[in-house]
Structures are given as C-alpha cells and as structure tokens.
Amino acid sequence: MPAPSSDQAAASAEAAPATHYAYKASLIGSAHQFELTAQGLSWHVGAKSGVWRYDELAEIRLSYRPASMQSRRFRCDITRNDGQRLAIYSTSWQTVALMTTQDRPYRDFITQLHARMRQAGGTASLIGGINSGLYAAGGVVVAAVAISIAGLLVRALATGEFAGALFLVGFAALFAWQIGGFMRRNRPQPYTFDALPQALLPQGK
C-alpha cells in the first residue's frame, strides 16, 4: 500500500479530534497539561495530577477574560462534584513581553471535552459568562461612567471646550468598544452540549 501523501496526512490530522492541550499560566513553572482519555479528563499542573471522570464534572463555565498583554483571551473553569476546580486559558506565556494565543487548539479541545461529557451522560451545569453578581455590579459601574461622560460632554459643549468634547467622544468610543465588548460576551447564560456559546470561544485559526 502506498504511503499517504503530505496533503492526506495533513487532512487526517485536521479531522482527528483534539485530545491534548497545554498552556503556561506564567513564565515560572511548568505548563498546565490536559488530555481527554477513555477514563476521563487527565490533568497535570505542577506537582499535582489526576483523572476526573466525565460524569464527575459538576460545572463548566466559559468566559471571555482579556488581559493587558492579550485582548483575545478566553477561559474555561471546570468544577468537579467534590468542589475541586481547574482553569484552562486560551493563551500561553512565551516571554516577559509575549502572551501568545492558542485559538484553534483551545477551541477544539473545549469542543471535544463537551462531546466526551455528552457521550458519558454528563449532567454538569453549563454556564456562559461571568458570575451574575459580578455582571450586575459591572453594569452599575458602566452606567455610572456613561452618565458621568455624558454630563462632562454636555458641559464641555456648553462652555465651548470643543477640544475637551472631542477627547470625551474618543474616550467614550474606546470605553464602549472595550468594556461594552466584555459585558456583551460575558452576559450570564446557560447553554447546552448541542449549542456552545460561540462568543465565548475563539474563532481565529
């Protein structure tokens, strides 16, 4: 039988389900490593390791967590039925000034994790977004800032401070883009194994 061509090998790798994922949470220390096995979710973090059966997982929470070094950053929090937790990020530290994205490996791994849980008959709570209390508090802060900016803008226009008004408009646009995007993506919402929240999964290659 002839050996598969490089294109065929690449296509085969493309179709294979993602069962491994690793990232560095900091420059110091080893990578956090995860594997989807027949027994369950295998993990290795520092000196600790274990295997959690898929039907032992009590909650999965997906969220969007931008950082100063990387605006496109996502997080998956996994809670076991005994309260233990694991966090998986879509980024990995490379150097002091570089946090790289791992969009496709992260998305594929999280998608495959949900598929394994569904096959195992998992009953975990599937939640998108941040905690509802934090979200409500964030909404109050956003509203307060918006009111303050609007008041300052009206005052600047009334006194003829057009340079100041222009600055406020630019600041408001930046605020709406950054904070508004965070709030929109992280709206608390339940989801199902059949419909993962795409806004909380990276879409890049």
Image (cartoon, rainbow, N blue to C red):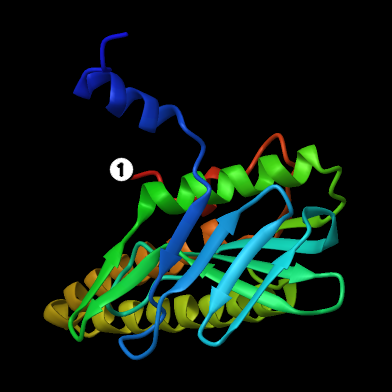
Residue positioned most to the left: 163
Residue at the spot x=52%, y=76% of the render?
142
Task: Tell me the quarter of the image containing the N terminus.
Answer: top left
Relative to 88, is 31 on the left or the right?
left
Whether residue 113 appears in this view of the structure is yes
Q: Given the image, on which type of amino acid does mark 1 rest? A: Lys
> Residue 195's x, y, as percent?
67, 37
Task: Tell me the quarter of the image containing the C terminus.
Answer: top left
Relative to 140, is 172 on the left or the right?
left
Say which residue label 1 marks.
Answer: 205
Q: Residue 4 or 100: which is nearer the viewer?
A: 4
Relative to 47, is 133 on the left or the right?
right
Q: In which quarter of the image is residue 127?
A: bottom right
> Residue 90's x, y, as percent?
42, 62
Residue at the spot x=27%, y=17% of the render?
4
Check disc 1 and report its element: helix, strand or loop. Answer: loop
> Residue 8's x, y, as percent?
29, 19
Residue positioned most to the bottom: 28
Residue at the spot x=87%, y=51% of the render?
123
Residue positioned most to the front: 1
Q: Residue 147 or 25: which is nearer the viewer?
A: 25
Q: Residue 203 or 136: which is nearer the viewer?
A: 203
Residue at the spot x=75%, y=70% of the render?
79
Q: How crowded is mark 1: few (under 14 residues within 10 Å), some or many (20 or more)?
A: few
